[in-house]
Image (cartoon, grey):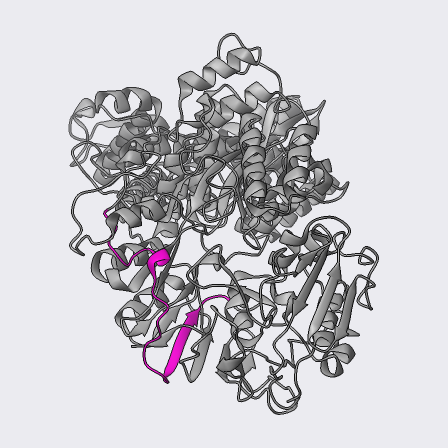
Amino acid sequence: MRTRRSAAAIAVAGVLSLAVAACGSSNSGGGSSSGTSGTPKLPLKAGENAASESITPGKKGGTLNVLSSEGFQYLDPGSSYFALDYGVVYATQRPLFTFMPNSQTQLSPDLATVIPTASNGGITDGGKTVTVHIQPNVKFAPPVNRTVTSQDVAFAIERMANPNVGNGYWGSYFQSAIVGAASAKGGPISGIQTPNSTTLVIHLTATVANTIVQALSLPGSAPVPSSVVAPLDKHAPTKYGVTQLTATGPYMIQGEQNGNNIASGYTPGKSLTLVRNPNWSASTYAGPYKPPASLNQINISIGGSPSVTGPQVLKGSDMVEFDTPTHATVQEAYQHYPSQITFTTGAGDHYMTLNNSKPPFNNVNLRRAVYANLNREAIIKEKGGALTGEPGTHFIYPGTAGFTEAGGYPGPNYPWAIHPSGDLAVAKQYMKKAGYPSGKYTGSATVSVVASDNGQDELAINQIVKQDLTQLGFKVNLAQVDQSVMYTKCQTPKDEVDACPSGGWLRDFNDPFSIMYPTLSAAAITPTVTENFGQVKNAQLDSLMTKAHTTVNPTQAANLWGQADRYAVDQAVSVPEDFDNQPNVFSSNVKWVGDLWDEGEVNFSYTSLK
Amino acid sequence: MSTGAPDILLGAEGAPSSFELAAGEIVALSPRQLFWRRFRADRVAMASAVVIMVVVLIAILAPVVVHLFGLPDPEQQNTNLLGAFGQATGPSGHDPLGVDSLGEDTLSRIIYGIRISMLIGVTGTVLAALLGTIVGLAAGFYGRWLDTLLMRIVDVFLAFPVIVLGLGIADACSIQGCLQIGGHSVITPGVVTVIFIITISSFTYIARIVRGQVLSLREKEFIEAAHSLGASNRRILFREILPNVTTPLIVYSSLLIPVNILLEAALAFLGVGVKPPTPDLGAMISSAGGDLLNGNPAWWNMIFPGVALLIIVLAFNLLGDGLLDALNPKGDR
C-alpha cells in the first residue's frame, strides 16, 4: 500500500457513472442525480470528473508553480512509495511500463518497447517467464550521459532487495515471485537475466506473469546507473535520492547535471525545482504513453496550510495544489470555479477491520450485524459529502479489475451489505442468529476500537462507528490516537485490537492482488506485523485468491477475483466504509492532467499551461 | 465553637428592617446574620448567585430542559442535517443554535455540557477542599516531621505545571484507566480521570491556606484553654480549629470552582478530558476550532459554548468575590 497524501484520502465510485450520465449537461448545475447505490448526489458537471480529462497538451513552455504542505519522502525510484513522491518520480524516471494518465487500467510501455503478453511472446512458459525489450536510445541525464541498458534495469530491480534501499513493495510482489529472489539482499538474482543490452528476462516461481508485468510499472523498475548508485547504496539508508540522482524522464532536478548533485534544486522541506532533461527525447516512446513535456520548469514550494494554498491556487495563475484540498476549498471550487477542480474515482478505499481471530468478532453473524448497521452514508458526509466518496460495498474498488465482477457499485446482494445508511433491524436479525435473542450483545467482552485522531473527519467517523456499535449493545472502548500509533496497534497481532475503523488502502497497480491479498490472506499475517488487521484466516478465501492470482488469462482472473471479493463480503471479514474520490484543484490557466491511477496526482509530463 | 465576640451593630442608616432599632439601641448580630446582611447588599454577588442557581438547575434537570425545548438527545447524530459538503449547519428553527459536524444539536449539547462542567468543577473542588483540609490540618496541627513531609509533597505537586500534569495523567489513563485494583481501574477514563486531575492539582492551594490558618489558630488562647481543660487532639482539631478555618475554605473553594471548570474545559479542548460523545463545552470549542482549520468556520459551535462557559465562570468568580467581601470585610483583596 502506498502512503497517501495527508488530509482525508478521498476516492470515488459512482461518480464515474454519474459523470458519464452528466456528459453534455450544462455547467449551470441543475437537479440532483443519484448514484447507483442511491446516494444523493450533487449535480456533477461535465469536466469535473477526471476520467473524462483530455490529455491533449496546451501551449509549449512556461513554469508551473506547485504548492504542497507536505514534503517528499523518497525521490530514489527504488525507495519511493508515497503518492506525492510519485508526481516527481514519474516525471524524472522511466519505469518499464506506465499507466496512461487518463486511465486506471491501460498499461503502456514506457522504457519498454511493448507490453509483454502471451500472444507477442513476452509471456512464455505458461506464465512463468517474462521477456521485456527496452528502447535502445534512452540516455541517462547529464553528467552520466550514456545509453540505458537492460543491465541498468536489472540492477534497479535487484537493488530493491537491498535493505539499505528499503523498498516497500519488494516483499509483496517480487521476493517470492522471482526465481532466486527469496534471499536476495541487493546482489545479482539468478531469475533475472540480460541476454543483450536491450533484453531483460525474468523467470518466475509461479504463473504470476500478469502481476509481475503490472508490478514493473512501479518506480523500482526505472533504470539507475550502478556507477553512481552502488557506492551510495552502501550507506544505510542509501544516499541515492538524497544528495544525488540521475534522471531518465523528461525532467530532472535542477543542478543534477553537476555531478548528479541535486542540492541546488532540492531543499528538503522547502522547495524542489524540476527542469528539462537535455538527454530526453520524445521519440523514445512506443506509445500510447508519449508525454509532451510541455512545461519548461516546475517549481514546487513545500510548506503552508492547504486551507490557505487552496484558495490561492483557485484565484491565482500557473498553480497546482499538491495536497488534498480542504472541504471548504472543494466547496468553493465546486460552486465558483467548477472548471478548476477534478474528482478522481478509484483513489482507494477505507474500511473497518474486525478481529476475526477472537471473540466477539470470530462469530460471522456478529460481523454481519456490524456490517449491516454501519452508516456508510454518514461516513461519506464527514469526508466532505457525496462528491468525495461513495459507500463502500465490497473490497475491490472502482477502476480495478474484478470490481465489476464483484458487483460494481451496488456490490454483492447480501442483506447486511445493501443498506449504505445502516439498518438496525437487519443488524438485529444477525445478532439473534449470533445467539443474542434480544438483538443486542449481552456478552462480557468490551470491544476495543483503536482509531486515528488525525483530523476532524476521522474524529467524527470514530463517533459514528462508536454509536453504531453501541446500538448493537457492545460496550466500546474507543482509543483515539495518532494515525501512526493506530496503524502500529492494528498491525500488531498480539495487541488483539477488536476493530480498527478508517483503515485506508491504495492499490499499487491494476491487479486486485495488490488490494486483497495483503489485507485479507492468512499468509500476510506474521507474529509481529501484518496488514491483515482483522487477522482473517479463511482457507476458502485464501484458496479463491490464490487461484485468481495464478490465472494467466486476465478475464478469467478478474472473474475469480470477483468471486473472492464476494466471498469476503459473505463472510463480512471486514466492513467496507467507502470508495474514495480524490479532488484536485488548479489555476484557471493550467491545462491539468492527473494520473487517474495515482489518486489523480498531477502528471508533470502531461500537464501544461493554456 | 469559639469564634470570639459577635459584632456589635449600632442603629444606623441602611440597617435592615428586621433589625429596626430605637435610636441608640445596640443589638448583637450573629456572624451568619452579619454575613447575610453584607452579602445581600452586594447586588452583583446576588445576581451571580441567581445565575448560578439557574445554571445548577439546568445541570440537574438537563434531560427535562432538553425535552421541554423539544431538542434531540445531545448524542444523537444526524448527518442528514449537514450541508452538501458535509459542513455543520448554523442556527435554524429546528436547531436554534445550529448543529456540529456530526449533526448533533448544539443547544442540547451545551445544556448537557453545562452539566458536565458543573459536575466536574464542583466535585473536583469539593474533593480538593476535603483533601486539602485534611492535609492542611494535619500539617499545621501536628507540625514537625509530618508538616515537613506533607508540605514537601505539596511543593512537588505545585512544581508541576497544572496543564502538563493534567495532559500526562489524562493521556496515561485514557485507554485502560489508572490505579488498577483487583483488575478494575479506580480512575476510569473520562469524567473520573478529570476529577482526579482537578483534585490533585487543586488541593495544594487549600492545604497551604488551611495549614497557615491552623498554625495561627493553635497559638490562640482558646486553644490553650481547650488543652488546659484536657480536650483531646481530635476534639481540638474538629471542634475548635476546623470551624475557624471554614470561612477561608468557603471563600477559596468558591473561587476555585471557576478555575477548575476552566481547567476541565482546557483539558477537553486539548483532547484529553471528557471523551466524545459526552457533551463538553471545552471539547465543543476545540471541535469548532478544528472545523475552522478545515476551512469550515462553524462559529456557532465556538461562540455559544464559549458564552456559556464565560457566564458560568464569571458568575462563580463574582460570587466568590461577594463571599469574600461578606465573610471577611476587613480582608485585603
Picture quadrant where residue B139 is located: top right
* Residue A248 in view (yes/no): yes
Please tell me whether residue A522 belongs to the stretch shown in magenta. Answer: no
Q: Residue at x 54, y 44 (%)?
A: A555
Picture quadrant where residue B212 is located: top right
Q: Residue A449 versus residue A63: which sits nearer the camera?
A: A63
Please tell me whether residue A62 belongs to the stretch shown in magenta. Answer: yes
Q: Residue A565 versus residue A179: which sits nearer the camera?
A: A179
Residue A298 versus residue A462 in the image, above or below: below
x and y percentages locating residue A185 in the rendered image: 81, 63
Magenta highlight range = A43-70
Residue B71 versus residue A506 in the image, above or below: above
Q: Residue A580 versus residue A563: which sits nearer the camera?
A: A563
x and y percentages locating residue A593 in the rendered image: 39, 67
Q: Residue at x 47, y 33 (%)?
A: A465
x and y percentages locating residue A361 in the rendered image: 61, 24
Position of the C terminus of chain A by quadrant: bottom left
x and y percentages locating residue A117 in the rendered image: 61, 57
Outermost residue to the top: A437
* Residue B275 in view (yes/no): no
